[in-house]
Image (spheres, rainbow, N blue to C red):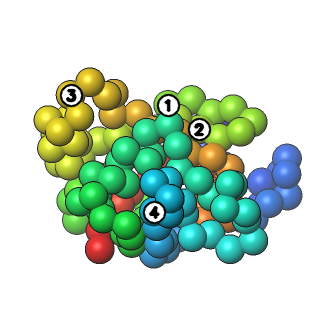
Amino acid sequence: MPKTECGFDSRSRAQIFCGMEKRVRFFKQDGKWYADIPNHTLEENEMVMGADVALDFLSKDGDEVFLTVTDTKPEEVVPLSFHIKEHDDDGAYYTANGELVLDFMTTFSDIEPVIWICNVTHDVFGEHPDDIYIKGIE
């Protein structure tokens, strides 16, 4: 997938938010994880296909976690990052990297460090960026 320049995507005319850092709330309700992204239904914000397991791990089996995310590689070492592996019309698969991946793989030895992130990501970054960096976990 070619990297899109900051500004506007020529195909969709969507604004591309390069270099953006955001704090995103995730919460667990009735045993399912959701992103707290406005203007979407609960179903659209549901975290599935690995993202839910990752949130259990990051929240230390809690019901809420805040992640500070960016699409620009920070100067400091980050505990977790994701690199795009495959993209389709509904979302993208990302491979997890970083120091927390070893802890994650020890805890969940039968799971690949790959998650799927749906198109709600466009409301955070403007598109599916090549890389997503987790700068903070609260």
Marks 2 and 4, how far apart in space? 22 Å
Badge 4, how many Cα within 10 Å: few under 14, some, many 20+? Answer: many
Q: Earlier in the sequence, mark 1 or mark 3?
A: 1
Name the quadrant containing residue 122. bottom right
Q: Is residue 107 visible?
A: yes
Q: Work out which quarter of the rendered image holds the C terminus and state it.
A: bottom left
Q: Secondary structure at mark 2?
A: strand
Image depth: mark 2 or mark 4 in front:
4
| CB-based contact (under 8 Å), mark 1 and mark 3 | no
Q: Earlier in the sequence, mark 1 or mark 4?
A: 4
Q: Secondary structure at mark 3?
A: loop
* Horizontal arrangement in the rendering, residue 22 relative to residue 56 (left or right): right
* Horizontal arrangement in the rendering, residue 14 relative to residue 133 (left or right): right
Q: Earlier in the sequence, mark 2 or mark 3?
A: 2
Q: Residue at x 46, y 67 (%)?
A: 27
Q: Amino acid at mark 3?
A: Ser
Name the quadrant containing residue 112. top left
Marks 1 and 4, how far apart in space? 27 Å
